[in-house]
Image (cartoon, helix red, strand yellow):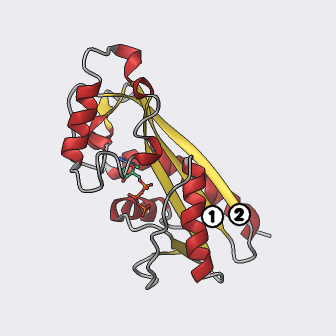
Amino acid sequence: QEIIFATGNENKMREIREIFEGLPFVIHSLKEAGLISDPEENGATFAENAFIKAEAVHALRPDAIVMSDDSGLSVDYLNGEPGVFSARWLGRDTSYTEKNAELIRRLEGVEGDARSARFTAAIACILPDGTRLLTEAHMEGRIAKAPAGENGFGYDPILYLPEYGKCSAELSEHEKNAISHRGKALRQMQEKLRGIYAD
Ligand code: ITT
């Protein structure tokens, strides 16, 4: 079974491939499927944006299973920002070194639990028969006082995970996938697909 993953983000794609390893699905990125799709993500929620991306590719390839990931970092002290704007926050061309430094600056003087934040991933899936599936999961943490770690991407260096005593970027990809928003939401989606395709 072919799954076309409606993302242009190579970092997500790398994690997604590991999470699907050993399962009876062949995953193709947009690029591998020879498709170009970049719809405007103007939804108010991660779920809405995930469906916007999946619908756009389903329209091009109704014969395939299409999956998408909309994700981001929500900081409670900043009323949920950057949230659905995570990729666009401070402009798409601003480096994550700068974005991460700016988030840390905005939380100056904020201590303890008040620094709470989480990654969310909404995974949308559209089957060839038109069935629409959605899963969503979180990874909870706090905004670190300083960035740490070289792994992962995006905001990983500043999400401190109290349970592990490390930032997300200090985890190996395998460790991150085991506990991350994306890992959990994708495994929930795999369960749904198993239920459907096992019949
Ligand atoms: P696609 O829409 O093509 O999938 P994108 O990067 O534009 O790629 P999103 O709109 O979902 O994807 O934006 C998600 C952003 O949230 C992403 O660019 C990162 O900045 C951040 N993000 C999401 N998951 C993350 C993770 O696991 N670790 C660090 N940052 C993450």
Contact flag, marks 2 and 1 (Cβ < 8 Å): yes
Q: Is mark 2 within 8 Å of ligand 1?
A: no
Find residue 42 and name its label: none
Q: Is residue 134 above or below residue 156?
A: below
Q: Residues within 10 Å of mark 2 (few under 14, many from 20)?
A: some
Q: Is residue 142 visible?
A: yes
Find residue 125 and name its label: 1
- Which residue: 65% across, 83% down? 63
- Which residue: 29% across, 45% down? 90
Estimate the x, y position of residue 29 in percent, counting from the top left: 44, 74
Please tell me whether mark 1 sits on a helix, a strand or a loop.
Answer: strand
Estimate the x, y position of residue 129 in percent, counting from the top left: 75, 76
Label whose residue precedes the other's in the sequence (2 or 1): 1
Q: What residue type is labelled 2?
A: Arg
- Which residue: 25% across, 42% down? 99
Residue matched to label 2: 132
